[in-house]
Image: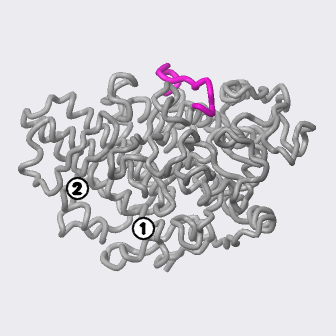
Amino acid sequence: MRTIIALFILSLFAVSCGEDFLQRTNPNALSNESFWSSEKDAQMAIRGCYDALQSGNYYDSGPWSFGIFRTDFMSDNGYCVWGSWMPGGSTARGKISPSNTWSALMFWDASYTMIGRTNRVIKFVPEMAEKGILEQDVANKIVAEAKFLRAMTYNLLTMTFVDVPLVKEPLSLEEAEVGKTPKSEIVSFITEDLESAYQDLPEAGSTEFGRATKGAALALLARIYLYHGQYENAAQRAQDVIDLQNYSLFSDYHELFSPDNETCNEVIFSVRYERGLGGNEGANFPGYWGNATVVHQAPLANLAESFYCTDGLPIDQSSLYNSDLPDEDRDPRFNATIVAKGSTWKGDSLETAPSTPTDYAMRKYTEEDNDLNQFDSPQDFYVFRYAHVLLIRAEALVQSGNYNESEVLGLINQVRDRVGMPHVQDVEGTGFSQQELLDVVKHERRVETALEGLRYFDLKRWGELKERAFDFYMQNEASQYGLAERVWSDKMMKWPIPQPEIDVNENLQQHPEWQ
């Protein structure tokens, strides 16, 4: 296939990450014989893997690129304002096809770039240890880091394309035409691989921030198990993260999403960015222009309306709600996530709604104290937070059917305590049915993690993508704001393999739904 041929026969370790632990070196075009000869080479290679995370088509995401962050604006959380051409817009509107796969092709290429780099590390670093070039424990740690990044990538591929080529080692030109592997086999491979490797990773605080730790690997396992319905495993791995006692909730939810606090104890694993170093070192995903709010992607009203009032009641039940000033007396996560009419933006109260088609703008992650072009932000992207882990355990327990209601509510209440919201039982009581309790968890997960690149995948795995991101959107948001329609087809539960990949690989077959 085009991407695999290009990526798996070249030494593409272009290292240019901006945080201190990533050295800015470019060993392009070095052969296997000349490269893998020192510990410096091994460290350079794994840093090249971390560098792949920074891609605008992996975890970063600007107006002209497509990363995981953009998926929130393909759900009932948000809207791609420039959707006629903006990456992710066609998928959000149901206009995607094998030949109209700009966003899908971008993500496919970025993913297999990562897989190509990690496979080389996993193959050649152990050989360095066998030759005495590396200490065995150093080699084990580097390989475990690569397996963590490879597992994270394949998990995302199975959540988008579903069945994809599973490539476990560097390929020669003759081997590069690889067919699809069923999703179930990929999930088994990455979980078994990571379960055997995570013990070789260090504890938090004993490695450079931004590199994989034992906690990060356990959090990834919990997420993979949750996404693929292995709920008892998900609950256990989430508990394992909690038991490490390395993490805690940061006191201020709003300030958590700022460069000043990106290395706090809540952040388990992040993609690191730095301003002013050139290349792709600054982040695009929180970018905007001048004094304006973010204009190219906007929260939908349904997300804004999902935040409860400070009495713990939905806006249609609370006497505190004021539709003219929607940010007043609301869950503090509303104002930390969304800019609305009456909100303070850059120190000024907005007398009118933000200039977006939905009357709401994104605040989370944005850097408000700078009037310059923000598309070189120092803000890290948080892949795993401690709050994510608490809510993974809460959901996994309920989904498994083997749960204690008080424990589940306790996990949710920990997250609510941080923002001063009432405990669930103080407003809604106790004695929930399994579905009622699951709905409580789902609500908390939505408002806690809004605009963090998780909602689209949640709706897909819950079987609610059509109902929430298309049906509800068409009945409410589109008619209310005159937005472009979204068209649903069941085949959109599985992204089409990009046609350029099909064209050059006779072993790669398009999904039957898209043929």
Secondary structure beneath dot 1 equals: helix
Q: Quadrant of the N terminus?
A: bottom left
- Amino acid identity at mark 2: Leu
User: Is 449 situated above or below 113?
Assistant: above
x, y percent for residue 375: 47, 52
Q: Is there any visible trace of residue 323 in the rendered image?
A: yes
Taking the spot 10% from the left edge, 36% from the top edge, the residue there is 130
Residue picked out by circle 1: 105
Would residue 446 appear left or right of 367 to someone viewing this image? right
x, y percent for residue 345: 67, 43
Quadrant position of residue 407: top right
Residue 296, labelled with which disc?
none
Q: Which residues are magenta?
A: 240-255
x, y percent for residue 116: 27, 55
Q: Is there any visible trace of residue 399 in the rendered image?
A: no
Q: Nearer the viewer, residue 424 or 105?
A: 105
- Amino acid identity at mark 1: Leu
Taking the spot 61% from the left edge, 71% from the top edge, the residue there is 94
